[in-house]
């Protein structure tokens, strides 16, 4: 698949914004591209760490996928927590501190503005646990991988509790049952919460037959099941757009690829003022 980037204004997109007809996929849009969204259109957005990069938060791939020399998949896993809960709590306390000090950027705000316009024709599924979408005013948000701002018991099924503490050494926080608390986050090797995946599936089924746009922003398309949503959306007839700084692993699955920092590309692509 050939991908050229919007930074090359001489590249003219062969396709009219409406149809998928041209058959040439992955040709990036020239500056000024605009996602066609009318009064019937449903929009499902998937975001990843890249949308929070301009808020100063590290991405996974950006940091070489490492934290403190540990592969993130190791720190962010039940095995990692069982092996060294202090290390994992230091990792998440650092993430909490950084997210608390960060602020939403124009890309977050552009999505909140689009939601205001579309209402229930809009859904935002995020892989991010930083909470910046909600702080930007987004309400129809599905946190696929949980959140930094709750903790739950690593053993019993007591409901999660709001938690903004920064534990880094013993005594680590414990549940009333005596077991260790852990961040309410979906770790590698763990299933996503059924309610969250059902809400996304329900939205896609509801969008089938109507003008349907699937937009992925700031994600490398590396982690499943989120990286597979573009294929499911295509199955339901969506026009698929990727707005990313670098080529994503699943870029070939998108009809339109727009390169550049989301804080710049999203307001223009969505035709919103932030
Ligand atoms: C599961 C919470 C059932 C923790 C996270 C099928 C095939 C292969 C593997 C699997 C598969 N099915 C399941 C797996 C295993 C695994 C997986 O996908 N592994 C990967 C590594 C291959 N998936 C799971 O374990 C999932 N559970 O499937 O359960 C099961 C279980 C076992 C076995 C089978 C089935 C659970 C996955 C969730 C894990 N938790 N996060 C935490 O955050 O600490 S995932 C975490 O990593 C993030 O949430 C996110 O999802 C992912 C990182 O990806 P991105 O967000 O995309 O970030 P990345 O840094 O990679 O990319 C950033 C992008 O932004 C870049 O492309 C860059 O160009 C761009 N960018 C940068 N700046 C900007 C920008 N773009 C625009 N503007 C900018 N300014
Ligand atoms: Zn407990």
Image (cartoon, rainbow, N blue to C red):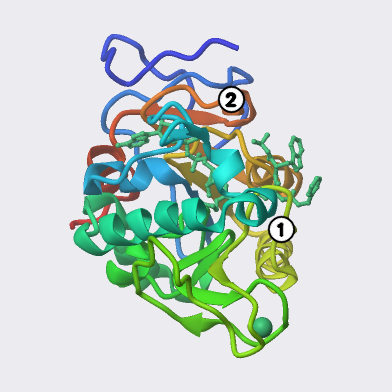
Assign the C terminus to one quadrant of the image: bottom left
Q: Hey, which residue is sitting farthest front in the picture?
A: 170
Element marked by disc 2:
loop
| Residue designated by label 2 | 249
Left or right of residue 97, residue 60 in this image:
right
Q: Position of residue 4 (x, y in %)?
A: 42, 13
The mark total stands at 2
Indicate which quadrant contains ligand 2: bottom right
| Residue designated by label 1 | 208
Whole-Å distance between the Cαs marked 1 and 2? 26 Å
Q: Residue at x 54, y 50 (%)?
A: 213
Element marked by disc 1:
loop
Q: Residues within 10 Å of mark 1 (few under 14, many from 20)?
A: some
Q: Residue at x 42, y 40 (%)?
A: 218
Q: Which mark is residue 101?
A: none
Left or right of residue 32, residue 217 in this image:
right
Q: Residue at x 65, y 63 (%)?
A: 200
Disc 2 under 8 Å from ligand 1? The reply is: no
Q: Hey, which residue is sitting farthest bottom in the picture?
A: 176
Res. 271 visible in picture: yes
Q: Position of residue 211 (x, y in %)?
A: 59, 54
Vertical relation: 197 (above or below) 140: above
């Amino acid at each position: 698949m050939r991908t050229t980037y919007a930074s090359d204004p001489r590249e003219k997109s062969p396709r009219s914004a409406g149809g998928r007809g041209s058959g040439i996929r992955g040709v990036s849009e020239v500056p000024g591209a605009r996602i066609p969204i009318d009064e019937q259109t449903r929009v499902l957005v998937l975001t990843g760490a890249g949308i929070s990069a301009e808020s100063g938060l590290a991405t996974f791939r950006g940091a070489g996928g490492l934290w403190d020399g540990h592969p993130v998949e190791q720190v962010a896993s039940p095995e990692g927590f069982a092996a060294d809960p202090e290390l994992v709590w230091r990792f998440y306390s650092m993430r909490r501190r950084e997210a608390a000090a960060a602020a939403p950027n124009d890309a977050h705000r552009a999505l909140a503005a689009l939601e205001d316009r579309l209402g229930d024709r809009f859904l935002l599924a995020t892989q991010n646990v930083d909470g910046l979408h909600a702080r930007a005013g987004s309400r129809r948000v599905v946190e696929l991988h949980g959140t930094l701002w709750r903790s739950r018991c690593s053993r019993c099924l007591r409901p999660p509790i709001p938690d903004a503490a920064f534990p880094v050494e013993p005594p680590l926080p414990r549940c009333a049952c005596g077991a260790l608390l852990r961040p309410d986050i979906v770790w590698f090797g763990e299933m996503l919460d059924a309610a969250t995946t059902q809400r996304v599936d329900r939205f896609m089924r509801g969008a089938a037959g109507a003008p349907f746009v699937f937009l992925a922003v700031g994600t490398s398309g590396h982690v499943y099941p989120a990286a597979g949503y573009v294929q499911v959306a295509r199955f339901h007839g969506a026009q698929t757009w990727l707005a990313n700084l670098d080529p994503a692993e699943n870029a070939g699955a998108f009809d339109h690829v727009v390169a550049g920092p989301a804080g710049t590309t999203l307001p223009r692509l969505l035709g919103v003022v932030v």
